[in-house]
Amino acid sequence: MQALCNINIKNYAGAVNSVNGALACFNIQKMLTPKSLTGAKTPEMVLISQPLNVITDYSSKINALPISVTDVLRILQATARERNSVYAVLANTPQGQTYNELLAKYNALIASEKAYVELSVNIISRDLDAQNLSSFDALVNHMKAFKPIDKSATSTLEVSNKIIAKMTALAVSLQGSNVSLATYYSTAMQKLISVNAYIKGYLATSGGR
């Protein structure tokens, strides 16, 4: 399994569509269906995880790659929309093999969403630490263009919330050493706070459809 991870990373070449393949090395979910009906008849979900040191090593390698946060945010949005669609079908599916397969897919999509959220936050945070706001601006623009606004926006809001917290901490830490930069971060952050509040307000008034 470690060789598989190495292959994914070597073939990565900055292509964001390989992110899912690389992250799949960390956690693999598989449905196991019993061969004999004399035993358990319900498929079993098995989670295989890499050791923490391996996950940390691969995470750092992936996060160090020159990945466009715009592309990651697009994939995050698409994954969230697919998760919403699967949940809608799952809610109306009776217990059985189809239900279990849908549940496995739903859980896998949630895991992918979490991975894309973390990757987005890491990319933007890395750029902010380098006083580069290009990834931050990409997040703001992505949120402004988010349509339709529905429950799939919650993952992007999670990214936004974490970046607001990150920028707040940066601004506070710089108050004593670089007031102009602290003010710059605080002013820029207002753009994200504004679009964040708009999406949250829309979800609240629309019932979060």
Image: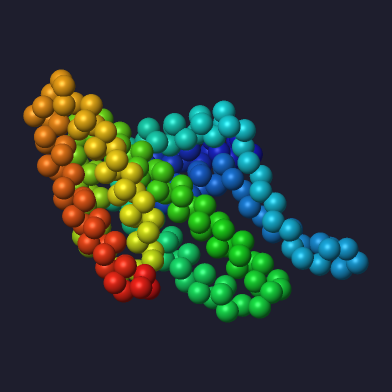
In the picture as drawn, the residue positioned furthest to the top comes out as: 177
Q: Is residue 97 visible?
A: yes
> Residue at the spot x=62%, y=37% of the render?
50
- The residue sitting at the left extreme is 180
**Residue at screen point 58% across, 32% down:** 52
Residue 30 sits above or below residue 96 on the image: above
Q: What residue lies at 55% left-to-right and 56% top-to-bottom? A: 108
Q: Can residue 147 be seen in this view?
A: no
The quadrant of the image that shows the C terminus is: bottom left
Residue, x 52% and y 70% (percent of image)? 87
In screen coordinates, is 20 left or right of 28? Answer: left
27 vs 85, left or right, is: right
Task: From the top left corner, tell me how far across and down residue 33 is, in percent.
Answer: 76, 62
Q: Quadrant of residue 185?
A: top left
Q: In this view, does 141 lie to the left or right of 7?
A: left
Q: Is residue 24 above or below residue 39?
A: above
> For this rendering, which residue is in front, 18 or 109?
109
Q: State the image coordinates of residue 134 (x, y, percent, origin top left).
A: 20, 42
Colour scheme used in the picture? Answer: rainbow
Quadrant location of the N terminus?
Answer: top right
Instruction: Pick the residue in front: 49 or 66.
Output: 49
Answer with the quarter of the image where residue 130 lies: top left
Q: Which quadrant of the view contains residue 180?
A: top left
Q: Farthest residue toward the right? A: 38
- Coordinates of residue 36 in the picture (x, y in percent): 87, 65
Q: Is residue 60 left or right of residue 69?
A: right
Q: Is residue 75 above or below residue 126?
A: below
Of residue 130 and residue 165, the one placed in the foreground of this image is 165
Examine the rendered structure and indicate whether residue 38 appears above or below residue 11. below
Give 108 or 188, whichever is nearer the viewer: 188
